[in-house]
Image (cartoon, rainbow, N blue to C red):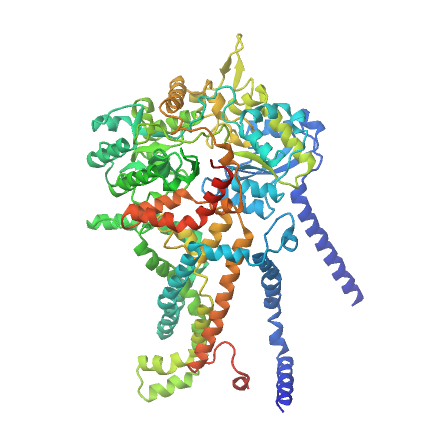
């Protein structure tokens, strides 16, 4: 009986896919990209269990079992970097994740179309700057001889060492990342808001709902599924704490504060005698943790009543 | 339909051909284009070298950008495509390129034995043919003088690296001292009553910084930096000058191997470093200074009272000229150069070894390109070639007088620019034209350099060897230098960053230092165990 249901489901899925084949065709470039740049290179993960010899290549290098993992788990710097990554990313979820949502809600309330477009452009623009440029601007503006400290001196206060303080380092990470990316991520939420039926707002207005009430009772529930998906993806990315940003912003004074797993991998791979097998082992560990976290977050969201990343077939129907 | 299908196939084939042409054209470039002047290059097929080195000028035309570049490229019929690396990315970039099989045809490599052994073992760099010394005897003669070349040949069972000799005939000391020196504002020192001497201990340097900070004799104001450094040079000044083995393992008097980071001298150096930082003698964000820009604060903007900075003999004239041009002050009256000693009054360093940077080749370089490049090196290892690399073109920039002495024909004042360097007559001049003998050797005799500076440089080198003991300035321990194992390869640290981090960290320095050592022992102890079991007494 159960088998019959499964065959039915399968058939109906294929039928639905065939019906919407034009839409599915749009997926092809993305699928090709993933195959070439994500799936095919996965064979490189075998390096984690080998001793890499460039002259023998990935396939020819000798297998060594779990030796690389033994070295990884013996290095206290590895555990420190894992802890630092989790710590920084917990902060990112707390201080960065809500910002695009808030921005989208606020921008949605702007009624003057032209002003709305200008603001959206201003918010989105920093996304297109690379971290190298952003870091250079920051160093120039925030160093002891920079513009900000110049103003601070003019007021008569003591200059602040923005770039070398480990206390300022984390807030600076969150602020700069918000400045750079919040406007870009906001677009996703704006799109979700645009999909909410406007009749709901009209009815709410007739019932005398204030703007805040409309946001709370219509807009937020309307974009809940998008928020949940974004949240699960953020959790699934918990072991990646933004290498580009930290690599460009850290210096000798803040290097320990920013020693995330990616920085650790970079350091052991390119700042000392390169050991690709060792760094592959660390990378594999990171990917496995990310994957587990992704599944966990999905489960928790479902448990809380949301749909999650993989809605059950019953709900799909 | 058929026609359009045929057209599509034709277009696809055309695209494939173009892609293949583009892929093969870049690496080859070996078309036979004889040079136009009918020189020696006429018989040589044209080659294109890709080349990477520190100290290059990004985007400069090293093939025909100036007459010296043209002289070489026409003589040897080549095009030189240079990737300019800087001090901050030199090691990392080359590591990435070499390990990924993307290194240029030729590169200048900052030798680190753990890396080098891994490159050799994996066949990532070219092994020179066994008969190379017979084929290029002048290069071989210089190679012997470097001492490290033959030593590595012995270790690796063949030649993979061609070290570039700092000195050939003018070796200023054995063991060889390094050139970075303290540049100090003489007029400011006199204004605050600080004694002018040829050597200072680190404490005295800090004392000078404090006096400058307190009195600001140059009226610089908020922008004053008593001692301007970047991370590397700050560690060199405060830690390395006090601790011989601050960044290495070493064999102690009792015959056992130890880690230099745990030495009391290192801790003492770190304390001095912290004192300089906490007292404002160093800029509060010195670690944000990239490349070698701290020298600019002293030589160009005049914000700094002192800097511990590069001082090879060959660069002194340029540094003094930069100071004069930018600040309008007579450098001979306003700059004082000195050696920095440890707190025990001795000069601390390990033998520099007579080389700087090694020439390495891509393992897949064609024989034609390799041989041509070796021919260039061979020419530059002759007297005539070497003089061309350091003095410019014979008959135009220099010549011999009736007694056979070298005389300069270059009048810098009349030309209004130096001979070499980015703003010079020949920006291509320098380390980039494939020389195995660096500027340092000839710099002591260079007629384009003021005699006072040459004498000063001699004195600085000489003093360092004299004011030292075999313990504070030891010769190379080749057993240790060539020791290689997986543990040793893992126990590589960026000491400058680690030490700068320790002194900027909150809390008690000594406690932080001990915690840091403890945290690294899982990497260090296996190396110590191996060293003591294999090399210890």
Q: Residue at x 44, y 75 (%)?
A: A228
Left or right of residue B204: residue A34: right
Corner quadrant of residue A200? bottom left
Residue A46 higher or lower than A144, as above or below: below
Residue B470 or residue B374, whichever sits in front: B470
Residue B71 higher or lower than B49, as above or below: above
Q: How many marks?
A: 0
Question: In this view, which residue lies farthest toward the front?
Answer: B537
Residue B112, image x and y in percent? 51, 39
The answer to whether one can see residue A116 in this image is: yes
Q: Quadrant of the N terminus of chain A?
A: bottom right
Question: In this view, which residue lies farthest toward the bottom?
Answer: A1
Left or right of residue A1: residue B493: left
Left or right of residue A22: residue A93: left
Q: Quadrant of the C terminus of chain A?
A: bottom right
Left or right of residue B330: residue A186: right
Corner quadrant of residue A277? bottom right
Q: Residue at x 37, y 21 (%)?
A: B466
The answer to whether one can see residue B80 in this image is: no
Residue B123, image x and y in percent? 63, 43
Corner quadrant of residue B317? top left
Q: Residue at x 53, y 7 (%)?
A: B402
Residue B506 or residue B435, whichever sits in front: B506
Q: Residue at x 48, y 66 (%)?
A: A289
Residue B392, image x and y in percent? 53, 23
Question: In this view, which residue lies farthest toward the top?
Answer: B402
Residue A259, image x and y in percent? 41, 54
Residue A172 or residue A255, whichever sits in front: A255
């Amino acid at each position: 009986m159960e088998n019959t249901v499964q065959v039915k489901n399968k058939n109906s899925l294929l039928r639905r896919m065939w019906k919407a084949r034009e839409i599915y065709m749009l997926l092809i470039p993305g699928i090709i990209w993933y195959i070439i740049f994500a799936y095919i290179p996965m064979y490189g993960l075998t390096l984690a269990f080998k001793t890499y010899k460039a002259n023998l290549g990935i396939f020819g290098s000798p297998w060594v079992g779990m030796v690389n993992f033994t070295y990884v788990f013996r290095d206290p710097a590895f555990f420190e970097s894992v802890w630092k990554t989790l710590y920084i990313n917990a902060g990112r979820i707390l201080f960065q994740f809500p910002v695009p949502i808030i921005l989208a809600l606020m921008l949605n309330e702007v009624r003057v179309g032209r002003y709305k477009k200008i603001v959206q452009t201003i918010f989105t623009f920093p996304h297109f700057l690379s971290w190298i440029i952003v870091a250079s601007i920051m160093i120039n503006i925030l160093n002891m001889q920079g513009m900000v400290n110049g103003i601070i001196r003019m007021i008569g206060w003591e200059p602040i060492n923005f770039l070398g303080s480990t206390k300022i380092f984390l807030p600076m990470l969150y602020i700069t990342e918000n400045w750079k990316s919040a406007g870009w991520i906001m677009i996703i939420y704006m799109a979700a808001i645009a999909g909410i039926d406007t009749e709901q707002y009209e009815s709410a207005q007739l019932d005398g709902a204030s703007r805040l009430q409309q946001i709370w009772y219509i807009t937020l529930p309307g974009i809940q599924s998008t928020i949940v998906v974004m949240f699960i993806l953020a959790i699934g990315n918990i072991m990646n704490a933004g290498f580009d940003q930290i690599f460009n912003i850290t210096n000798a004074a803040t290097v320990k504060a920013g020693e995330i797993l990616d920085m650790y991998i970079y350091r052991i791979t390119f700042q000392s005698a390169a050991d690709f097998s060792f760094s592959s082992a660390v990378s594999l560990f990171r990917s496995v943790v990310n994957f587990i976290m992704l599944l966990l977050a999905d489960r928790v969201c479902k448990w809380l009543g949301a749909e999650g990343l993989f809605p059950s077939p019953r709900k799909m129907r | 339909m058929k026609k359009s299908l045929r057209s599509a196939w034709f277009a696809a084939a055309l695209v494939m051909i173009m892609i293949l042409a583009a892929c093969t054209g870049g690496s080859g470039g070996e078309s036979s284009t004889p040079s136009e002047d009918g020189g020696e290059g006429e018989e040589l097929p044209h080659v294109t070298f890709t080349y990477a080195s520190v100290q290059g000028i990004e985007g400069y035309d090293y093939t025909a950008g100036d007459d010296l570049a043209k002289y070489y490229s026409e003589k040897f019929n080549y095009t030189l495509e240079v990737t300019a690396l800087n001090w901050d990315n030199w090691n990392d970039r080359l590591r990435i390129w070499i390990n990924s099989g993307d290194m240029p045809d030729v590169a200048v490599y900052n030798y680190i034995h753990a890396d080098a052994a891994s490159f050799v073992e994996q066949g990532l760099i070219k092994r020179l043919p066994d008969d190379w010394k017979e084929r290029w005897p002048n290069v071989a003669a210089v190679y012997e003088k470097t001492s490290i070349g033959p030593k590595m040949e012995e270790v690796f069972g063949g030649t993979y690296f061609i070290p570039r000799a700092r000195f050939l005939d003018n070796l200023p000391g054995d063991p060889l001292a390094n050139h970075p020196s303290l540049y100090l504002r003489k007029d400011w020192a006199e204004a605050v009553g600080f004694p002018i001497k040829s050597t200072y201990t680190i404490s005295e340097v800090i004392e000078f910084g404090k006096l400058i900070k307190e009195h600001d004799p140059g009226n610089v104001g908020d922008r004053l930096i008593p001692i301007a450094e970047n991370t590397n040079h700050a560690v060199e000044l405060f830690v390395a000058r006090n601790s011989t083995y601050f960044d290495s393992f070493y064999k102690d008097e009792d015959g056992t191997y130890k880690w230099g980071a745990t030495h009391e001298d290192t801790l003492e150096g770190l304390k001095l470093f912290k004192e300089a930082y906490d007292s404002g003698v160093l800029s509060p964000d010195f670690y944000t200074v990239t490349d070698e820009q701290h020298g600019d604060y002293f030589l160009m903007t005049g914000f700094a009272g002192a800097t511990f900075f590069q001082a090879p003999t060959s660069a002194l004239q340029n540094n003094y000229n930069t100071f004069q041009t930018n600040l309008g002050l007579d450098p001979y009256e306003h700059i004082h150069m000195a050696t920095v000693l440890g707190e025990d009054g001795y000069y601390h360093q390990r033998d520099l070894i007579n080389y700087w940077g090694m020439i390495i080749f891509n393992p897949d370089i064609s024989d034609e390109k390799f041989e041509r490049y070796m021919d260039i090196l061979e020419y530059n290892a002759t007297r005539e070639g070497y003089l061309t690399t350091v003095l410019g073109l014979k008959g135009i920039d220099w010549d011999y007088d009736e007694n056979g002495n070298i005389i300069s024909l270059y009048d810098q004042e009349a030309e209004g620019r130096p001979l070499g360097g980015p703003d010079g007559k020949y920006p291509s001049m320098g380390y980039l034209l494939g020389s195995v003998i660096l500027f340092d050797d000839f710099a002591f005799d260079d007629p384009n350099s003021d005699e006072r500076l040459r004498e000063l440089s001699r004195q600085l080198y000489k003093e360092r060897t004299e004011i030292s003991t075999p313990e504070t300035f030891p010769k190379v321990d080749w057993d240790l230098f060539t020791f290689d194992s997986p543990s040793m390869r893992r126990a590589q640290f960026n000491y400058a960053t680690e030490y700068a981090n320790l002194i900027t960290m909150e809390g008690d320095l000594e406690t932080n230092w001990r915690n840091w050592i403890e945290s690294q022992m899982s990497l260090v102890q296996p190396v110590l165990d191996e060293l003591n079991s294999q090399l210890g007494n």
